[in-house]
Image (tube, grey):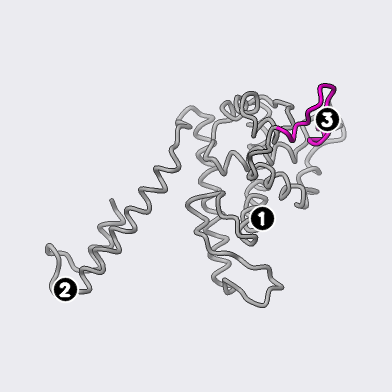
Amino acid sequence: MGFISTDRSQENLIGYSISDFAKSDAKSRYVVKIVSQLDLQSLFARYSDQGGDAYSPDILLTLWFYAYSKGLTSSRKLEEMCRYDTRYIYLSCNLRPDHTTLSRFRQHNLDLLVDYFVQILLIAEREGLTDFRHISIDGSKIKAACSARHSFRDDQLSRKIESIRQDIQQYMERCRLAEDGGLSDDLDLDAIRAEKARLEALEQQLVERANSNSENVSGLSKPSIARTIRLI
């Protein structure tokens, strides 16, 4: 079996390269850079030597991680983006995999994708880039193990990784639901982020108000206030 791929930097006959599609999007170029640094032997090993050529798995991994960073869960929508969105054209090397290929890749390599996504997020966060997810990544940098200063103790890092892993697994479940037709892909991530910040600020205000007043506020004790806001 061979792999269908191409060189993003190679110019074609009319004088442009695929990398030209991502000149204004540092994020997509960074994802390509990180994926190129991963050890993907386990992923490539899952492909048989027999059969026809397949899309190179590093390209499909790159596409699905970028989709994850954008909250995109539908393989049909991802197929469409590979045709019309310059960022995805760059990520896919303009090869335009169809939704069946994208879906099968995700389903057949689910365990590896979770591990690779965790690695990518930790590398990005270690380097100070926190714009990949708005829930699991909170802006705190994780330093390299050889660093003289550590942002996290071992137990804190373990909890951080578990939180990231849970978020990725929830995303993968949303992908499955999208494939089954049970979930819309129309997510407003900015609105979700703003609502999360609003609720956190509201909780903090009420807790501070309760701390400054020895009496219960509206008949609720301070622990009850915090629990009430979390349930909104």
For residue 217, which numbered disc appears in the image? none
Amino acid of disc 2: Asn
Report the side of 221 relative to 183 (left or right). Answer: left
For residue 119, which numbered disc appears in the image? 1
Please give the range of residues in magenta. 5-20
Residue 142 covered by magenta stretch: no
Q: Looking at the image, do the residues carrying marks 3 and 1 touch, with CB atoms under 8 Å apart?
A: no
Which quadrant of the view contains residue 164? bottom right
Q: Which residue is mark 2?
A: 213
Q: Residue at x 63, y 45 (%)?
A: 27
User: Residue at the top extreme?
Assistant: 14
Q: Is the residue 100 above or below the residue 195 in the image?
A: above
181 or 97: nearer the viewer: 97
Q: Residues within 10 Å of mark 2 (few under 14, many from 20)?
A: few
Which quadrant of the view contains residue 62? top right
Amino acid of disc 3: Glu
Q: Position of residue 52 (x, y in %)?
A: 83, 26
